[in-house]
Amino acid sequence: LEATLALLKPDILANPAFVDSIINDIQNSGMKIALRKQVFWTQGQAEQFYAEHRRRFFFDRLVKYMTSGPVEAIALSGPNVISWWRQKMGATRPAQMRMTNPTCLRARYGLTDTRNSFHGSDSVESAKRELVFVFGQPAYK
Ligand code: ATP
Ligand code: MG
C-alpha cells in the first residue's frame, strides 16, 4: 500500500464547489483519503517544500502563488496511488493538457504553468518527505 501527498492549490480553495467536486471524485475512485488538512504556508514553508526548485526561473512566482491563500493537503493511500494521482492531475502545463489530455484535472481547472491547481508527490521518497512535512507521518493505512 502506497501513500502520496496531494495538494489542492490556492486557486482551487478559492472556489469551494471545486473542492467538493474534486474530493467526491477521489472518494468515488476507491483510493482512500487518510487525512486532510487545510494549511496556509508562510513564505519560509513554501520555500522549504519546493527547495529542489530554488534555482528555477519560476521559483519566486511559485512561492508567491503557494502563499496567496490556503492549500488543502490530502494524504491519499491505495495501491499505486502516487502514479494514480499524477495521472489524474495530468502534466504540469494546463494549456498543453487541454490539447492532449482534456479530461485531466489540470486541463479542467489549471490557469497557467505556475498556477496549475494541483500537486502530487513524484516518487515514494518525495511522498514520504512531503507527507512528513505536512502531516508529521510518512505512512497510512
Ligand atoms: P513533476 O514533479 O513531474 O516535475 P510538477 O507538475 O510537480 O511535475 P515540478 O517540476 O515539480 O512540476 O514543479 C513544481 C511546480 O512548479 C509545478 O507544479 C508548477 O506550479 C511550477 N512550475 C513547474 N514548471 C514550471 C514552468 N515551466 N513554468 C512555470 N511554473 C512551473
Ligand atoms: Mg513535482
Image (cartoon, rainbow, N blue to C red):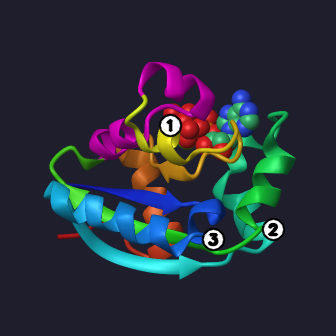
Question: Which element carries disc 3, helix, strand or loop?
Answer: loop
Q: CA distance from mark 1 to mark 3?
A: 18 Å
- Residue at 27% x, 70% y: name it: 33
Label 3 near label 2: C-beta < 8 Å? no
For disc 3, the neighbor class at 10 Å (few under 14, some 14 to 19, many from 20) is few
- Residue at 79% x, 68% y: name it: 44
Number of numbered discs: 3
Residue matched to label 3: 14
Residue matched to label 1: 107
Residue type highlighted by circle 3:
Ala
Classified by dominant secondary structure, the portion drawn in magenta counts as helix
* Residue 100 falls inside the magenta stretch: yes
Query: Is tag 1's residue or tag 3's residue first in the polypeptide sequence?
Result: 3
Query: Is tag 2's residue or tag 3's residue first in the polypeptide sequence?
Result: 3
Where residue 24 sits in the image (x, y, percent)?
28, 66
Along the viewing direction, whichever of 48 and 29 lies nearer the viewer: 29
- Is 13 positioned to the left or the right of 90 in the image? right
Q: Is mark 1 within 8 Å of ligand 1?
A: no
- Residue at 47% x, 71% y: name it: 17
- Is 45 positioned to the left or the right of 29 in the image? right
Q: Quadrant of the C terminus?
A: bottom left
For disc 2, the neighbor class at 10 Å (few under 14, some 14 to 19, many from 20) is some
* Residue 105 falls inside the magenta stretch: no
Residue matched to label 2: 43
Range covered by the magenta-colored residues: 82-101
Q: Quadrant of the N terminus?
A: bottom left
Q: CA distance from mark 2 to mark 3?
A: 19 Å
Where residue 42 sits in the image (x, y, percent)?
77, 74
Residue type highlighted by circle 1:
Ala
Which of label 2 and label 3 is nearer to you? Answer: 3
